[in-house]
Image (spheres, rainbow, N blue to C red):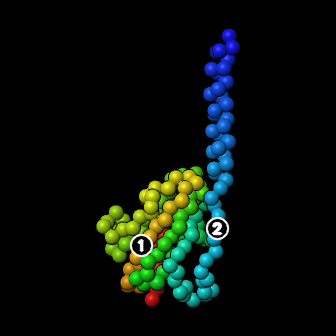
Amino acid sequence: MSFALKQYRLPLFATVTAMAVTLAASCGGAGRETEGGETPGGDAPGRTSFDLLMNESAGNIFVLDGTSNPTLAVPASAEITVQLVNNGSAIHNMRFGGIDMKYFTGDDAVSDPEFIGPGGKGVLVFTAPGTPGAYIYQCDIHPTDMVGEIKVVK
Ligand SMILES: [Cu+2]
């Protein structure tokens, strides 16, 4: 009966098509932009924008220009924008612990969207503390692996 055969073949075709779409999606969106210079040696002057990748290239990790879980040097009291690209296969996010250096308190800033799926993009915007020092960031999903420092400089 040809009717039964058609019923069988249609889902198979749909599955193959879905796989092709998934493969194409996972290849895109990992662009790297260059911006802002960093002073070699000595204290970095601090930047107000960063482009971070989030993936599983060395365990779950944030990557900035090849540096894992980078320290982000920022000017005191400046508005900071961190563009996030998840080019991995897990869900990630980014949370700044705020002035109190504790997560999940009222002064945190979290990525928008809060959780970024594979191939997705997001942005974390926050105002740097006015007091120079070492502050903290993490991925809420991988809080032991994806952690780093926000270094506020004068
Ligand atoms: Cu993560």
* Closest to the observer, 53 or 13: 13
Specify the amino acid type for callout 1: Phe
121 over 152 or under it: above or below: above
7 over 26 or under it: above or below: above
Give the residue displayed 63% in from the left and 20% down from the top. Answer: 7
* Closest to the observer, 39 or 82: 82
Task: Inspect this view and state whether residue 44 appears.
Answer: yes
Q: Quadrant of the N terminus?
A: top right
Q: Secondary structure at mark 2?
A: loop
Q: Dot 1, how many residues are within 10 Å of its Cα: few (below 14), some (14-19), or many (20+)?
A: many
Specify the amino acid type for callout 2: Arg
Give the residue displayed 48% in from the left and 80% down from the top. Answer: 74
Q: Which mark is residue 94?
A: none
41 over 12 or under it: above or below: below
Q: Position of residue 45 (x, y in %)?
A: 53, 87
Q: Quadrant of the C terminus?
A: bottom left
Q: Which mark is residue 32?
A: 2
Q: Residue furthest top?
A: 1
Give the residue displayed 51% in from the left and 83% down from the top. Answer: 46
Q: Which residue in the structure is indicated by mark 1?
A: 126
Q: Position of residue 97 (x, y in %)?
A: 39, 69
Q: Position of residue 120 (x, y in %)?
A: 55, 56
Q: Quadrant of residue 101?
A: bottom left
Task: Inspect this view and state whether residue 62 appears.
Answer: no
